[in-house]
Amino acid sequence: MDIIEAIQIRRSARKFLAGEIEEEKLKAVLQVATHGPSAGNLHPWQTRVIRDTETKQALAEAAQGHGFLADAPIVLVFCIQPARSAERFGARGAELFCIQDTAVAMAYAQLAATAAGLASCWVGDFDEQKVTRALKLSNGDRPVTILPIGCPAAAVAPNPRMTMDDVARRQ
């Protein structure tokens, strides 16, 4: 599958089949995340790979009760490491670049999951403190996005998209 096709067929899935994800697919998803552009090539993020039922349940509760997080075979949590960006770029690195870089990594991972035949759903609506406690984050690391992945339980219909005229302005 080429990148354009992966982008066009990607859907937000909230129902997953039970069962493990092949380790090769997971490794490919995580590896592709490292290929995104990153300010200063710092990659100021870390991905937590969650398989533990108890932790997935805590994440679901932190994410406004989204039970599909607990049902996914694997949940990836992308965490920023602001101090890594700040060392080189100061406040702008800590407040912006690390978030941008992490969002790119997560988007690449999501597209890699799609290309591998897996389903996912970008989750940003969560209580940051609860996720931080559930993952025992330290050193200023902060969760930015949660990505449950697994084999899709059902096909997901596409959502309407904005037109080019809605999102692009020529000047």
Image (tube, helix red, strand yellow):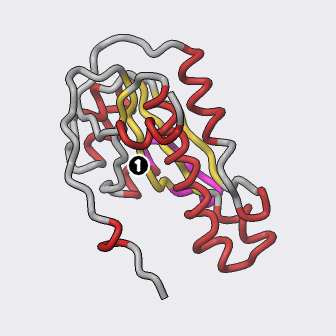
Quarter holding residue 124: bottom left
* Left or right of 118, for residue 46: right
- x and y, in percent, of residue 31 in the image: 66, 33
Quarter holding residue 85: bottom right
Q: Magenta-highlighted stretch: main secondary structure?
A: loop
* Left or right of 132, for residue 17: left
Query: From what the image shows, is residue 19 above or below residue 88?
Result: above
Confirm whether the magenta stretch covers residue 117. no
Query: From what the image shows, is residue 140 above or below residue 117?
Result: below
- Residue range in magenta is 133-142
- Nearest to the observer: residue 160 or residue 109: 160
Confirm whether the magenta stretch covers residue 140. yes
- Nearest to the observer: residue 22 or residue 131: 22
Residue holding disc 1:
131
Which residue is rendered at x = 38% and y = 42% of the image? Answer: 8
Circle 1: residue type: Val
Residue neighbourhood size for the residue with mark 1, other residues' Cα within 10 Å, grouped as few (<14), some (14–19), many (≥20): many
Which residue is rendered at x = 45% and y = 36% of the image? Answer: 6
